[in-house]
Image (spheres, rainbow, N blue to C red):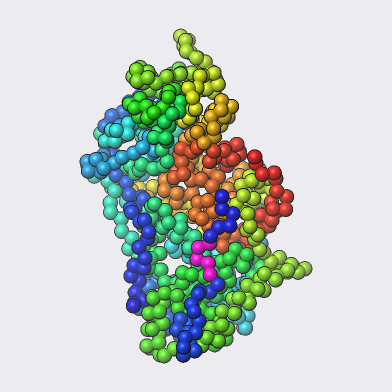
Amino acid sequence: MSISPSVRFPAAGCVDDPWRSHTVRIAAITDEVPGVRTYELHFEDQEVGRAYRFAAGQFNMLHLPGIGEAAISISSDVEEPERLAHTVRAVGNVTDALARMEVGETLMLRGPYGRPWPVDALAGRHVVIIGGGLGLASQRAAIYELARHRAGCTQVTVIHGAKTPEGLFYTREYESWRAAGIELEIIVDEPAAGWDGRVGLVTAVLESMTLEGPAAVLCCGPDPMMTAVASTAKSRGVPSDSIYLSLERNMACAVRQCGLCQFGPKFVCQDGPVFPHAEIAPYLCVPQL
Amino acid sequence: MQSDPERPGRGEGGDSPGGSASGVDPAWVWLAKDRLQDLIDLLLGEGYRVVGPQVADGAVVLRELSSAGQLPAGWLDEQDGGHYRLRQDASAGIFDHVVGPHSLKNFLFPPRETIGRFVREDGTWRQEDHTIDEPPLAVLGVRGCDLAALAIQDRVFLGGEHVDPGYRRRRERLFVVAVNCRRAVATCFCHSTGCGPAAGDGFDLALTEFDERFACQIGSPRGEALVAALDAADPLEACTAEEVVAAREQPAALARSMHARVAEPGQPRPRSLQTEGIRDLLFDNLEHPRWEEVASRCLSCTNCTLVCPTCFCASVSEVADLSGEAVERERHWASCFTLDHARMHGGSVRNSTASRYRQWLTHKLAGWIDQFGTSGCTGCGRCITWCPVGIDITEEVAAIRADPQEASP
């Protein structure tokens, strides 16, 4: 026995340093809508890249040393983890600095984090994916998966809403999504000249659409939109535990240790970002929670 | 939903069997007060940085020490909402003060800490290996409430999928000399949270103060080794079973007196917290008018979160050198009372003081139960004492409990 400060206990489940990140290089930049670009990132260490896996709806922490770090959902295909894409709107110091970067430059990445979309639990359902604006980015991986194999779903409908036609995301991919049997409903709030599509809110589409059997709703967008979608979905008979919402909050750690992303008793980083509506319903309608 | 959380690190002074065939308890020895210096010297000799309570700037704070003479013998604290005063009292012992503004949190989860270093070479960023190189820490005078807080912070930093490396490094080498309280102030309410006044599990040694000596309970192999070293230098007397009973009676008597406290005119109101069903009580009352009422007094100053021994919110800053090619990431304490805490690109989620106070109190007493299987409150009373306007967490809960809104459907 000794008084010496040798290691007293192995911390259970201690696996890694949550602050450890990996160098990634910008391989391609695609302009999406004004102020929003998609960055394809490749791991500098190929071994890290080969081992990296994520699930649809998860996010990474992107770190620009000297600038800061931001939580950004992964918008690429889970089957191509070596070509990670993040679709980012320049709205803060980190995302503004990212918007000034060019192909070939490096940044740091750690992840993936968070609870994904329940892609494997949708058998027998009519899956309705509702993405408001950039919200569609967190759903694109799920769309790719459901386009590839239906996972037993009776039908897959993607409802994408934007304020204006030029704010619509991933328009170049719509044809291939439709070709894969996905029903696509596009709706804008403020039509521009020449727009011959639907005008209104995503909830209007959800209200009037035909549901093929029991439905599951996967929604990502601004908080008020998600509250409205949840309410409309419930009125269409979709049970609260089949309505999934992806939330966004301030975050510094992504491993439930910084406390910043709390929403009621939940940590958005770890308990979410995807929540069944049933889990968070009491908190959604409380202002400034 | 849990309404009666399991409490980590709680105990009524340990569970040793008390008494062996020879009539002495091998887990307890008598330590003369003048042997505290030997104890400190042994720890220093092993390379520990020794920290203990000392009087500085008008308060009992935790600071590095090398001499037992630096401990606050003869000092007593008076505490009430927004009030802290020290006075000298010739009859007071070495540890008759209670908790000051500092806790173990200040040392294990320091206010500022570098969590990563990054360099850019030939235009490519990479993270450098980061080792935590600091001497091990020994802390004297840790109370039951702060041992409970330690167990709670363990759940935050060690209990999840990801373990904080700095906290882990400091925590696993920590040496704790606890003290069983024999005095409480009006803001103490550990008796109602189950965290004190006896030191629960998690100490290496625990001291119970008598006039000339301490009854010293051994709580770990490391504590046992320290007692063996003290004994080798100058033999220690073992406690008899009866003496152990007398030592245990000290915090037990204090606990009874705390339960029996009543408000008296002209005296600080004794606090207690009714914890039964508190999780649902608070989450069912997120829009209670009391949040606006307390917000009219709250300055949003963050003092309560700084002195709280369990508050763990933090944010991270980038610290770059002049070239911009070398960057350190620094984690620092954050507070839910600031606008930045819930800042999003569209502004802060919690714009009002009412929403920020609600976040703090509901997290501490309710959300924590969902997140970590325990309340975040130990009953140490620091948030009451150090609130500049004397806002009282126990009073706020009582106000909601007295007039709850209908539970949401």
Expressed as whole percent of the image width and height from the top left, the position of residue A258 reads 46, 50
**Does residue B36 appear in this view?**
no
Which quarter of the picture shows residue A146?
Answer: top left
Q: Which residue extends farthest right?
A: B265
Q: Residue B398 or B407: which is nearer the viewer? A: B407
**Does residue B356 appear in this view?**
yes
Expressed as whole percent of the image width and height from the top left, the position of residue A163 reads 50, 21
Image vertical order of residue A203 relative to residue A242, above or below: above
Q: Residue at x 63, y 77 (%)?
A: B253
Q: Residue B273 or A29: which is nearer the viewer? A: B273
Which secondary structure is most common in the magenta stretch? loop
Q: Residue B409 or B203: which is nearer the viewer? A: B409
Q: Is residue B75 magenta?
A: no
Image vertical order of residue B119 relative to residue B259, above or below: above
Magenta-tinted stretch: B7-11
Expressed as whole percent of the image width and height from the top left, the position of residue B209 reads 55, 81
Q: Residue at x 53, y 29 (%)?
A: A238
Image quarter of the C terminus of chain B: top right
Q: Residue at x 26, y 35 (%)?
A: A82
Expressed as whole percent of the image width and height from the top left, the position of residue A4 reads 34, 74
Q: Residue at x 31, y 28 (%)?
A: A29
Residue B287 is left or right of residue A25, and the answer is: right
Count of number-bearing discs: 0
Residue A185 is left or right of residue B395, and the answer is: left
Residue B119 is left or right of residue B198, and the answer is: left
